[in-house]
Image (cartoon, rainbow, N blue to C red):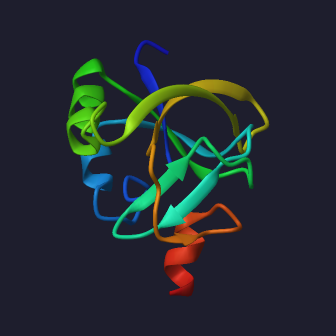
Amino acid sequence: MNGQLVFVYGTLRRGFSNHHLLAAARPLGGALTRERYALYLGEYPFLSRDQALCRVAGEVYEISQGMLMTLDALEEHPRVYERFVIPVVLDSGREIEAWCYFHPAPRGRLISHGDFSRAARED
């Protein structure tokens, strides 16, 4: 792999409003965070590092440096969301490290099961 890896858990996932930004990315598949976090749903999904509540579901993509800059602009890193490298476990069982965007002051409804896609279908 020559690009950056990114773990997406919200609107960048397949089928959601910002997924088009990953059109040129190489999908590695579904994944879960290794660590537990808190996922909230407000106007947007918010992931918090401050609460260890559940493993979060998402997808991993290999992206170019230019695409990472585009995602940073979308997430307003580092002013709004902050990007950190975290361990994630692919559906295949392989553990990798990938960038992930966190919000320092999440708000909204807690998604206790940690899956934005599932929560969106339930609404």
Q: Quick check: 103 left or right of 29? A: left
Farthest-out residue, top: 2
Location of residue 111 (image quadrant): bottom right
Decide which of 46, 58 is in the foreground and name it.
46
- Residue 50 horizontal/vertical position (percent): 62, 43
Location of residue 36 (image quadrant): top right
Vertical relation: 98 (above or below) 24: above
Residue 22 visible in the picture: yes
Vertical relation: 18 (above or below) 3: below
Seen at 52% across and 81% down, the residue is 121
Seen at 74% across and 38% down, the residue is 35
Farthest-out residue, right: 93
Vertical relation: 113 (above or below) 38: below
Seen at 42% across and 21% down, the residue is 4
Q: Quick check: 28 left or right of 32? A: left
Farthest-out residue, bottom: 123
Q: Quick check: 74 left or right of 22? A: left
- Residue 45 horizontal/vertical position (percent): 44, 60
- Residue 117 horizontal/vertical position (percent): 53, 68
Vertical relation: 84 (above or below) 30: above
> How many marks do you count on the picture?
0
Residue 9 visible in the picture: no
Q: Quick check: 120 left or right of 79? A: right
- Residue 43 horizontal/vertical position (percent): 34, 69
